[in-house]
Image (tube, rainbow, N blue to C red):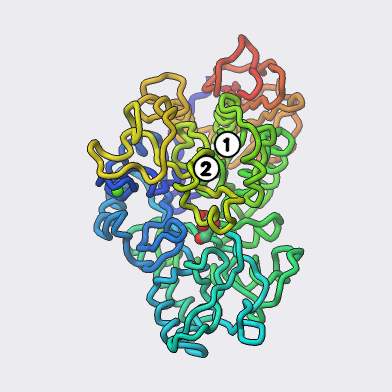
Amino acid sequence: MHVPSAPSSPSPDSWWRTAAIYQLYVRSFADGNGDGIGDLAGARAQLPYLAGLGIDAIWFNPWYPSPMADAGYDISDYRSIDPVFGTLADADALIGEAHAHGIKIIIDVVPNHSSDRHRWFIEALAAGPGSAARDRFWFRPGRGTSGELPPNNWQSIFGGPAWTRVTEADGAPGEWYLHLFAPGQPDYNWGSADVRREFEDVLRFWFSRGVDGIRIDSAALLCKDAALPDVSGAEPPGPAHPYTDRDDVHSIYRAWRAVADEYDGRMLIGEVWLPDATRLARYVGPGELHTVFNFPYLNCPWDAAALRQVIDETLALADAPATWVLSNHDVDRVVSRYGRPDTAFSLDRRPYFHALPVDLALGTRRARAAALLTMALPGSVYVYQGEELGLWEVQDIPDELRQDPIWARTLGADPGRDGSRVPLPWSGTEPPFGFSPAGAAAAPWLPQPKEWRDLTVAAESAGYGSMLHLYRAALRLRRFDPEFSGTALTWRRSPAGVLAFDRGGEGGQGRPGAGQSWMDTAGPGSSVRCVANLSAAPVGLPPHAAVLLASGPLDGGLLPPDTTAWLRIE
Ligand code: GLC
Ligand code: CA
């Protein structure tokens, strides 16, 4: 028998290469003070839960003071905490306590836009046209005889025009300002030296407080063509696009990397949605960001060939350690996606996906299989809160309770993202399911489905075979089994609709496409083989020394459809 050596811990300054990172959406995680909104006190109290889950880091969605025009992605002060969430002292305590649990902290920084209540924007409104204060944003006179038309035809990503007209100090209608998202989110002009200096300083502020990483919101949108030309809608992202993936954005991240490198072991991860892998690759590397989110993987249908292609393309990006992401606060929850007849996803087709029927039992089965597939891949993995409980997308939130600006700005055509942001169920048999303390003054800010009584942390901790047990077991093996520590993945030839690959062992050269039969053993040394059956029929398992973990019951020696197994091969 192969005796594993001591588990290899990644060197401290590259923890982000292999980390399991829990995305904590603070409004919906745990409410400490009973106002129906999650907060830092609630998060602190649940650090032992996260430590027990086996994650290495937490990514906090924005926690700063904000008028909440977009759930905190409209920041009015980048150096403080919203009173609804707590205080800076709470954040300091949380960072310290997380570190004591061995958990790193990543925070969200939003550099594309500000809030219309940010000091700089208020100054800009007061200072008037042509002022230096307005030059930190995109103010322009309107078109038409009296400036009554927006400066160009850009549309907000949340629906409606990307421009809002202001009232000048004299009370007359005046200039317009650009907002690629909601009107409460004015875009910064990254041609302004003030803006560049300010953000480098914000990074230092948080790194100096002990924050280990920064998630960069809307990272490909920062630079605009200063001529602000109309768009046809057909421009691909890249240098010819007036605001997506322009080449000058890279000088910003090179400067940010230099700031991160002033400290030990800090990381930058970019939220970059780009279809072209070569363009995406330009964001990562020694002089730029450490990693980017893998959205092609998230958007991929539950289909073996399509997943295999995304995995290969991801691993082929030599300078970019892979990240694996199944869901986040902007997309439909994975259980619902995989329970639909079309298992793909894309942000701009949400109404289409929401019109499809959902088979929750099938979606849950596939989400379990997907979790084991994902956690077997080399790289870092993101777990969006509630994914570990198997929560589904809540598609029947009453219209009058919907909060996402997408809903209002599309006049209800797009339901928006509230369904993935419903507060977590912790315990008990009825709402608020322990999300808020007993006797809370307010109900959770979005209503929880009553069926979630079966999906609380307490219920799943008790019930063997729950999603939570699966996540705990998988995260533990992924962390402690030495076969998972390297970067190598060796594909095994497998029946149609089945994905099979080895981690560790002698066979692992990291060469996608190495074509050994999946019935082969791995040669000298042991390895872990991940076999995911996405076909409609059971398949036989290859010879193995042990089944380490399976996403569902095995049928004798057979792996049923929509099931993944981790096998020890010797
Ligand atoms: C990112 C965030 C999203 C937010 C948008 C605008 O896509 O993930 O939640 O609405 O940026 O800041
Ligand atoms: Ca609260």
Instruction: Write down the quadrant of residue 155 in the picture.
Output: bottom right
Mark before the other along the chain sequence, 2 or 1: 1
Looking at the picture, how far across and down is residue 269, in whole percent?
A: 52, 56
Seen at 40% across and 82% down, the residue is 123
Q: Residues within 10 Å of mark 1 (few under 14, many from 20)?
A: many
| Residue hosting label 1 | 374
The C terminus lies in quadrant: top right
Distance Cα–Cα, label 2 vs label 1: 7 Å
Residue 42 appears left or right of 375: left
Q: Nearer the viewer, residue 260 or 409?
A: 409
Q: Secondary structure at mark 1?
A: helix
Q: Nearer the viewer, residue 265 or 426?
A: 426
Seen at 48% across and 51% down, the residue is 14
Seen at 63% across and 80% down, the residue is 226
Q: Amino acid at mark 2?
A: Val
Which labelled disc corresponds to residue 381?
Answer: 2
Looking at the picture, how far across and down is residue 192, in whole percent?
A: 51, 81
Q: Secondary structure at mark 2?
A: strand
Dot 2 and dot 1 residues touching (CB under 8 Å): yes
Q: Amino acid at mark 1?
A: Thr
